[in-house]
Image: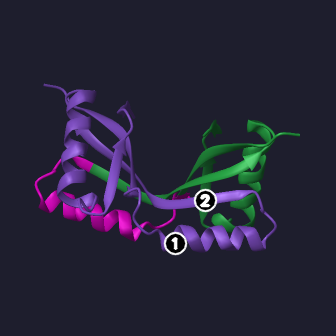
Chain colours: A purple, B green
């Protein structure tokens, strides 16, 4: 079966309700720079993976498994996967 | 003028062609875990900002300015802004 390369982006964010000190620091810095209207900032990771797969669905399933096994911390983080785009 | 709160996500990624050692390390780790079809991984930051603004366009303009002044390194990073969504 012919494989194609798919590009998939993953967003990994601190679970809601957990402390996000990096986001709080950026919020304070933005206020100091004059961006007074900023209410909150949350910082996560944006990971772009290119992987070969027979179809988009299998590429997404593989990336879901990568998140569970390696990329995201299941205790403190949530992740979302964007749809697979052929490269 | 009445302000609303908008949520805007920003993706900040290493500029294409620059070294991404974190991405290379994750690629190796995924290969070790059996994900042999992974070709490349790039790691950036996913920042979600909630800010008050009169309309979506002005919220996006403010976030663009935040990226240029604080969030992104103009020498080594590119950023993209998603459209503003009312919260």
Describe residue A38's horizontal placement relative to residue B49 as left or right: right
Position of A21 compared to A84: left or right? right
Secondary element type, mark 2: strand
Mark seen at residue B32? none
Q: Is residue B32 above or below residue A22?
A: above
Res. A76 image quadrant: bottom left
Instruction: Return the residue nearer the eye: A62 or A20.
Output: A20
Residue displayed at 67% across by 73% down: A28
Mark 2 neighbour density, 10 Å: few (under 14) some (14–19) many (20 or more): some
The label on residue A22 is 1
CA gap between label 2 and label 1 equals 11 Å
Q: Is residue B75 visible?
A: no
Left or right of B64, for residue A23: left
Label 1 crowding class (10 Å Cα cut-off): few <14, some 14-19, many 20+?
few
Is residue B16 located in the magenta-colored stretch of the structure?
Answer: yes
Looking at the image, which residue is at 64% across and 65% down?
Answer: B71
Query: A10 or A87: which is nearer to us?
Result: A10
Front position among marks 2 and 1: 2
* Residue range highlighted in magenta: B13-38
Percent x, y of residue B44: 47, 59
Of mark 2 and mark 1, the one earlier in the sequence is 1
For disc 1, the chain is A
């Amino acid at each position: 079966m012919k494989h194609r390369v798919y590009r998939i982006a993953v967003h990994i964010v601190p679970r809601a309700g957990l402390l996000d000190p990096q986001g709080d620091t950026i919020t304070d810095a933005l206020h100091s720079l004059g961006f007074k209207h900023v209410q909150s900032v949350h910082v996560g990771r944006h990971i772009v993976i290119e992987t070969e797969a027979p179809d988009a669905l299998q590429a997404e399933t593989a990336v879901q498994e990568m998140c569970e096994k390696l990329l995201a911390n299941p205790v403190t983080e949530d992740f979302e996967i964007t749809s697979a785009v052929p490269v």
